[in-house]
Amino acid sequence: MSTLAESYLVGLIGDGVTPSLTPPMHEAEADAHGIRYLYRPIDLAAIGRPGSDVGTLLSSARELGFNAFNITHPCKQLVLMHLDSVSVDAERLGAVNTVLIRDGRFHGENTDFSGFAHALRTGLPGVALDRVVQLGAGGAGAAVAYALLASGVRHLTLIDLDAERTRERAAALAALFPDRAVVAASPDDIGHELAAADGLVHATPVGMHQHPGMPVDARLLSPRHWVADVVYRPVETELVRAAVALGCRVLDGGHMAVGQAVDAFRLITGVEPDAGRMRHHFLDLLAKGL
Ligand SMILES: NC(=O)c1ccc[n+]([C@@H]2O[C@H](COP(=O)([O-])OP(=O)(O)OC[C@H]3O[C@@H](n4cnc5c(N)ncnc54)[C@H](O)[C@@H]3O)[C@@H](O)[C@H]2O)c1
Ligand SMILES: O=C(O)[C@]1(O)C[C@@H](O)[C@@H](O)[C@H](O)C1
């Protein structure tokens, strides 16, 4: 038998999360530390529950002895109203992807932003952060943009097909970081924006197996740009391949996927994970077609 203090029972709540690589990443890292750790996807689509049930699911899970959760689409905002406390960054960002259950209370964190910020620091050390263009202002884009500004980016241009979403996101971020410039631009302006930028961050679905292609004309990139992608299925996207071929410094989307898991594992267990080992495991899982 194991109790709350001797083992970890963790879940991932979200729509379509059955194939997620986050549960096996956590479990393998826990195994390596000799920690008893079970991590189950709780797929809303599979159990026929709406995202608005996230509070009910958390309450049941607390009664059943769960220690923590990762939370994903469509619940990252919906979960906020069910929490007893939230980290400063998750509150400012308005999104939670990690819930810790401690002494019967729910505490929310956001490791999407911290995972990307860590990946940027360690994967692209010393890159210029004066001007960055970010393509994609949806769910992942919100966390990444927040991480860029928290990491010191001085001028951030957001570009998305959804002009209203882009304007709203830029205004919200500008209010959070009043000493920076955060502007919305149209996809037609990308050439002009990239000409003045140090780096490009890509956070749209373009380049995924289901949406193959290049999100930006490679002729607009030059070796002085650094390029970060968030797409990780495949990890070597067309954008990543093109940027490497040009001689750009590149961060693939696997770094963010592993980064959020590294930070969540540390928060849940209090044990320092081996980030390099978790990335190796993640790449192995992808290579096996999982
Ligand atoms: N690496 C990670 O940890 C991680 C985490 C979450 C999501 N992702 C990946 O990020 C990508 C985006 O996911 P999301 O949850 O933000 O999706 P989302 O639907 O919330 O947002 C995507 C945004 O991209 C915009 N868009 C789509 N095509 C575009 C184009 N050609 N040009 C400009 N804008 C365009 C859409 O209008 C939308 O606002 C997916 O590939 C997902 O797999 C990666
Ligand atoms: O790997 C996934 O499936 C995730 O859902 C991706 C992202 O949404 C993270 O915030 C979650 O912690 C895990």
Image (cartoon, helix red, strand yellow):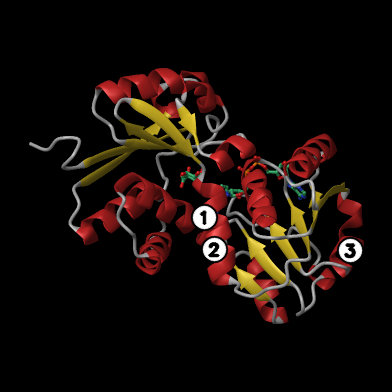
Q: Earlier in the sequence, mark 3 or mark 1?
A: 1
Q: Secondary structure at mark 2?
A: helix
Q: Earlier in the sequence, mark 2 or mark 3?
A: 2
Asked whether the residues under the numbered discs 2 and 1 touch, taking CB atoms below 8 Å apart as contact, a structural biologist would say yes
Examine the rendering and report whether any part of residue 233 can be seen.
Answer: no
Task: Check residue 265 in the rendering and tell me which mark sits there, or answer none.
Answer: none
Where is residue 64? Give x, y as percent: 24, 24
Examine the rendering and report whether any part of residue 33 can be seen.
Answer: yes
Q: Secondary structure at mark 3?
A: helix
Q: Residues within 10 Å of mark 2 (few under 14, many from 20)?
A: many
Give the left or right position of residue 146, taking residue 165 as reference: left
Q: In which quadrant is the N terminus drawn? A: top left
Separation (CA) of disc 2 from disc 3: 26 Å
Q: Would you identify the image quadrant in which residue 3 lies?
A: top left
Q: Residues within 10 Å of mark 1 (few under 14, many from 20)?
A: many
Depth check, front residue: 156 or 133: 156
Where is residue 169? Give x, y as percent: 76, 39
Q: Which residue is mark 3?
A: 191
Please identify the residue farthest to the front as the structure is shown.
Answer: 179
Question: Tag 3: residue type?
Answer: Gly
Q: Would you identify the image quadrant in which residue 194 lies?
A: bottom right
Question: Tag 2: residue type?
Answer: Ala
Task: Residue at 59% x, 65% y: name it.
Answer: 120
Question: Tag 1: residue type?
Answer: Gly
Q: Secondary structure at mark 1?
A: helix
Q: Which residue is mark 1?
A: 115
Task: Check residue 119 in the rendering and tell me which mark sits there, or answer none.
Answer: 2
Judge whether 155 appears above or below 82 on screen.
below
Q: In which quadrant is the C terminus drawn? A: bottom left
